[in-house]
Image (cartoon, rainbow, N blue to C red):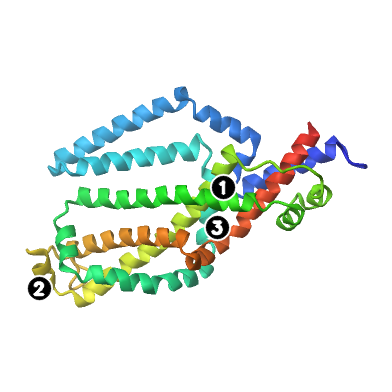
């Protein structure tokens, strides 16, 4: 029902401004025309040809690597990497995830001033825990005897476990914000947005607000996922660099050879740097990323630190969507 002094034209103007705001803030799936294009991209006749092309390219690349390097263990890693790259490329283009990923990454790495203190709180305890693995002969023996392809496949496996864990737990964050919708929530979360005035008018209207479902729900989950992956990546790179430097300073070649059970392949840029040092550092960095992912979601202390930066954005998106849907219903 239109309010006094307002008509379909003013509602439509607010809807257009809201949709522009959604697109600018990585909420593409909140816009109906984008959702329609994504649905078309998910039809088998649209994604099967690219899928077959990427599969053929991955198989050819894996065969070429095995032929040139004579390393059969590298084939699964090469095939998996190509498949993941193809899926990511299709999602960024046909599924319109580029705006979501771009905004989330910009939001994450554009606030390094806030991320560095948060990471510095988690890093000391994590390094104490992981350093005991680093100065352990068994860890060096295991990683040094892994073929490069197997090591990379292990890193991908640990990364996949972290992503799966996030996909299981992050919907709870969306539900928590969705369940908090009331009149005060709508006024607070839409303040400073194109729908601020509309929220004041409709906040006290009776009736339940529609829950966040479907593509809109996955949009919010993807934003949280990319933000969290960005934070974990920052920490994993820090751990990797720390162990490279620490190992080059204290792990002499004699110690490395005694722990790996054979000669090490030296690198030119640091006195004690070796391929084996890079391998164990990479493995421990990936393991640290998985450990940190679990801690950041399950531990209340980490949750308050690492989700505080995006909780406000999540609530604002939920509030904007609730007002936007009321406007669309009223306009039609």
- For the residues marked 1 and 3, what is the alpha-carbon distance in whole angstroms? 14 Å
The residue mark sitting in front, 1 or 2, is: 1
Q: Residue at x 79, y 38 (%)?
A: 12
**Left or right of residue 46: residue 203:** right
Q: Residue furthest bottom?
A: 250
**Left or right of residue 15: residue 291:** left
Q: Residue furthest left?
A: 262
Secondary structure, mark 1, is: helix
Q: Which residue is mark 3?
A: 107
Identify the disc placed on residue 220.
1
Q: Nearer the viewer, residue 4 or 74?
A: 4
Q: Which residue is mark 2?
A: 254
Secondary structure, mark 2, is: helix
Estimate the x, y position of residue 78 in percent, counting from the top left: 26, 42
Q: Residue at x 17, y 53 (%)?
A: 146
* Figure check: 283 above or below 253: above
């Amino acid at each position: 029902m239109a309010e006094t002094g307002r008509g379909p034209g003013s509602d439509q103007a607010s809807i257009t401004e809201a949709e522009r705001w959604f697109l600018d803030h990585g909420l593409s799936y909140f816009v109906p025309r984008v959702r329609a294009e994504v649905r078309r991209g998910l039809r088998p006749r649209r994604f099967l040809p690219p899928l077959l092309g990427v599969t053929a390219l991955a198989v050819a690349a894996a065969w070429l690597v095995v032929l040139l390097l004579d390393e059969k263990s590298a084939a699964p890693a090469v095939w998996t990497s190509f498949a993941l790259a193809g899926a990511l490329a299709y999602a960024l283009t046909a599924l319109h995830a580029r705006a979501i990923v771009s905004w989330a990454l910009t939001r994450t790495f554009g606030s390094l001033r806030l991320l560095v203190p948060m990471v510095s709180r988690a890093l000391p305890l994590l390094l104490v825990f992981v350093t005991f693995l680093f100065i352990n002969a068994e860890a060096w023996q295991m990683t040094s005897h892994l073929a490069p392809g197997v090591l990379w496949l292990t890193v991908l496996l640990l990364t996949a476990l972290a992503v799966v864990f996030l996909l299981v737990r992050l919907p709870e964050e969306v539900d928590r914000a969705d369940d908090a919708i009331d009149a005060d929530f709508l006024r607070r979360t839409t303040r400073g947005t194109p729908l601020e005035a509309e929220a004041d008018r409709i906040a006290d209207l009776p009736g339940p607000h529609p829950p966040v479902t479907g593509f809109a729900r996955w949009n919010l989950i993807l934003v949280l996922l990319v933000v969290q992956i960005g934070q974990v990546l920052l920490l994993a790179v820090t751990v990797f660099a720390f162990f490279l430097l620490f190992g080059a300073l204290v792990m002499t070649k004699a110690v490395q050879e005694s722990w790996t059970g054979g000669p090490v392949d030296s690198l030119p840029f640091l006195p004690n740097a070796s391929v084996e040092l890079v391998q164990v550092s990479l493995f421990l960095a990936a393991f640290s990323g998985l450990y940190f992912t679990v801690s950041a979601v399950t531990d209340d202390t980490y949750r308050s630190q690492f989700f505080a930066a995006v909780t406000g954005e999540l609530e604002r998106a939920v509030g904007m969507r609730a007002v936007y849907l009321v406007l669309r219903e009223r306009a039609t």
